[in-house]
Amino acid sequence: MRISVDAMGGDDAPREIVAGALLAAHQINGLERLYLVGDQSAIEAELEGSSEPVPACIEIVHTTEVVGMGEAPATAIRRKKDSSIARAISLVKEGDADAIFSAGNTGAAVAASTLMLRTLKGVSRPAIAAVIPTSKNPYVLLDAGANPDSTPEMLQQFAVMGSIYSREILGVSSPRVGLLSIGEEAAKGNETTKKGFGLLEKARLKFVGNVESRDLFSGKIDVAVCDGFVGNVVLKTTESVASMISTWLKELFRKSPIRILGYLLSRGVFREVR
């Protein structure tokens, strides 16, 4: 396996990206090549300052530009031909890498991937898939932010892609697909979701109908389909609630010595939940 990494993408790049790449290089079996794409001097400085040995599979690909987190994606990709994200994706296009990883500007990654790699036949737009854990089984949420405005046809395509991901990656033999809406009835929702409901009923999928946000963590579905606006709100709300509960519990445990003792005895459980 050969992986191309946008070393300059992200709020704490290249420090955290390089650190993560080193961990991956030591842990992934069969990793033939790991390209660190970005400013060579900055990447070398991080590698030299790391306590981890640098594996032979790591190779630096120098670039001179970076797409910032706040830049307009399409404009940045057109103007910054030598950006780390563009060059990282080009390695896949040229056949030098099998996959690309970036923690940078999401819109730029989607735009560059669509422009340079194209989509599969029958897929009009790529989607961001997020695997969300629950007490029973994880589910795939898509779109989680790539397409704030989606058509009914795109929702159907997301459902197909999500089902394939759930089956091939998560090992679910017959993924249950739910359409995220404001009610379980087919008539509930906006025009996009109502038309999407009709398309999903006709698709060769295990479509269980509309699901509400309260159903997302019940284990009823394996794939949740929605537009990128709703999906991103769901994803970030989930992250926020998880963080809030963790902080809240820590504050409660600190209120007395007995509670602190209880926390120390329960640390294993909290690690599993995390």
Image (spheres, helix red, strand yellow):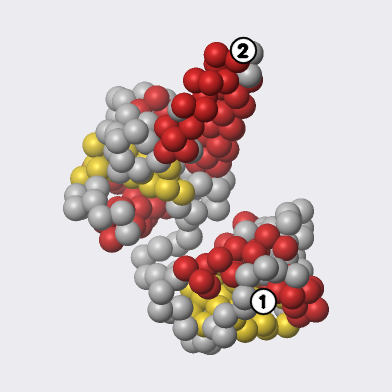
Tag 2 secondary structure = loop
**Residue drawn 45% across the image and 27% down it:** 266
In the image, is residue 28 above or below residue 181?
below
Task: Classify residue 76 as left or right of residue 146.
Answer: right
Q: Earlier in the sequence, mark 2 or mark 1?
A: 1
According to the picture, the residue beneath numbered tag 2 turns out to be 256
Going by the numbered disc 1, the residue's amino acid type is: Val
Please say whether residue 75 is visible from this viewpoint.
no
In the image, is residue 165 above or below residue 246?
below
Going by the numbered disc 2, the residue's amino acid type is: Ser
Residue 253 is drawn in which quadrant?
top right
**Looking at the image, which is closer to me, 159 or 151?**
159
Task: Classify residue 64 as left or right of residue 20.
Answer: right
User: How many residues crowd around disc 1 within 10 Å: few (fewer than 14), some, or many (20 or more)?
Assistant: many
Q: Give the image location of residue 247, x and y in percent.
A: 61, 27
User: How many residues crowd around disc 2 within 10 Å: few (fewer than 14), some, or many (20 or more)?
Assistant: few
**Residue drawn 63% across the image and 70% down it:** 52
Discs 2/1, front: 2
According to the picture, the residue beneath numbered tag 1 turns out to be 37
In the image, is residue 250 above or below residue 8?
above
